[in-house]
Amino acid sequence: MCCASYPPAVEWLNTFEDDEEIILPGYVVMELIQGCRNKIEQEKLQRELATYGMIWPSPDDCDRALGVFAQYRLSHNAGLLDVLIGQTAVALDIPLCTFNQKHYQFVPGLQTVQPYKRGSE
C-alpha cells in the first residue's frame, strides 16, 4: 500500500487499538489493485491488505445506493463506486476515512473523516 511508508499515514494507523479492526470496502480494495503498475506492486499491496478486514455491501445496501446514485448522478456527478463505498459505511454506521470528502457529501447519513493532513495541507 502506498501509504505504508508515508509517516503521517503510519502514525494515523498506529492510533488504532489492537482490538480495533480496520475494514475496507471491497470496492476500495479493487481500486487500490487497479492503481498498481505491475505484478510486484500488486503482490505487495495484496500482502499488506491481507491484515485488514474487507466488507461488501448487502443487496439492501446496493438498493439504497442505487436510489442515491439515481438521485445525485446528474446534479452532483455522483460516482458509482463512491456511492457504493459511502453506502457501505452508512450501513455499518461508521465514518468513512477519506481525503475525497467532496465525492461523498451528498450520501445521506454518511459521516466522512479526513484521516490525517497530507504534505501540502
Image (cartoon, grey):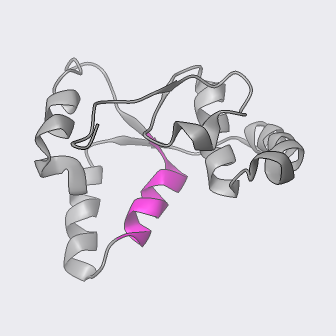
Magenta span: 24-35
Could you tell me what secondary structure mostly forms the magenta stretch?
helix
User: Can residue 68 be seen from the camera position used here?
Assistant: yes
Say whether residue 19 is left or right of residue 82: left
Residue 16, relative to residue 10: is it above or below?
above
Residue visible at 28% across and 51% down in the picture:
50
Q: Nearer the viewer, residue 64 or 120?
A: 120
Residue visible at 21% across and 38% down in the picture:
9
Say whether residue 24 is left or right of residue 45: right
Indicate whether residue 27 is drawn in magenta: yes
Residue 6, relative to residue 88: is it above or below?
below
Say whether residue 6 is left or right of residue 19: left
Indicate whether residue 10 is drawn in magenta: no
Residue 44, relative to residue 97: is it above or below?
below
- In the picture, the quarter occupied by the N terminus is bottom left
Residue visible at 51% across and 24% down in the picture:
95
